[in-house]
Image (cartoon, rainbow, N blue to C red):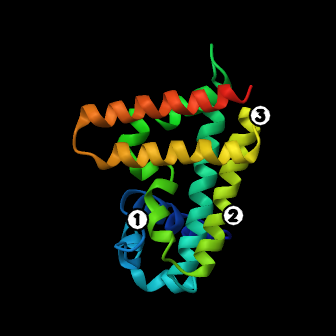
Amino acid sequence: MPYPEGHKLKVRGRIIESAAKAFRANGIRDISVPFIMKGAGLTHGGFYAHFSNKDQLISETCHYAVSDTLSLLQKAAEQARGESRVETVIHYYLSKEHRDHMEIGCIFPALSSEVARASQAIRRVYTSELQRMIDFLSELADIDTATGSALLGILVGTLLLARSVDDPLLSDSLLAAGKQQAIRLVQAKH
């Protein structure tokens, strides 16, 4: 009996969702194809029916994860009440919830150190996705892309550090300081 129309695309989507969750939480180096396939409820033998190699999966997952994050940030911006849309996004990005749920958060803090040593194809996709995030923040805040790049650096760096320490008070303090500096940066440009 043949599979229904769109079955292969749905399965591919499940694999990418599983990979996004795994890569966000654990990075790319230590995550195996069998682990990703198991997370999608599949056996690892079917992987090559959907992807030519792990690099292709990483590239497509990076695009998917950034699209997912941009969607969440856009929703946060649309709910701004009493502060600017970009300030609402800053508060959302540097929240305890975002810090504590890596598996559904922004992929940049999880992958940045590894991508520097990845293949050129992965670095190309990562660069494109990073530029997409910079463009989103720059447009949202009505700032130039150099300032948007600095803003993204503050956000990603702060989140990475806040996730890395084992002292909850220091972690909270890092989030608060990052929010304060990110908002100052944006306000200085207006």
| Front-most of residues 31 and 186 | 186
Return the residue at label 1.
27
Answer with left or right where residue 176 lies relative to residue 80: left
Confirm or deny contact between disc 1 and disc 3 (CB under 8 A): no
Q: Does 15 appear above or below 99?
A: below
What residue appears at the point 61 percent right and 38 percent down from the top-left corner?
73
Label 1 or label 3, whichever comes before in sequence order: 1
Find residue 113 and report its image quarter.
bottom left
Horizontal and vertical percent for residue 41? 40, 67
Question: How many residues crowd around disc 2 within 10 Å: few (fewer than 14), some, or many (20 or more)?
Answer: some
Label 2 or label 1, whichever comes before in sequence order: 1
Q: Which callout, 1 or 3, points to the residue nearer the camera? A: 3
Answer with left or right where residue 21 lies relative to residue 80: left
Label 3 or label 2, whichever comes before in sequence order: 2
What residue appears at the point 52 percent right and 31 percent down from the top-left corner?
181
From this viewpoint, is residue 8 visible?
Answer: no
Find residue 2 and report its image quarter.
bottom right
> Residue lying farthest front?
188
Horizontal and vertical percent for residue 131? 69, 56
Horizontal and vertical percent for residue 91? 52, 29
**In the rendered structure, which amino acid carries the disc numbered 2?**
Ser
Return the residue at label 2.
128
Return the residue at label 3.
142
Measure the C-alpha gap from mark 2 to mark 1.
Answer: 19 Å
What residue appears at the point 63 percent right and 13 percent down from the top-left corner?
82
The quarter of the picture where the C terminus appears is: top right
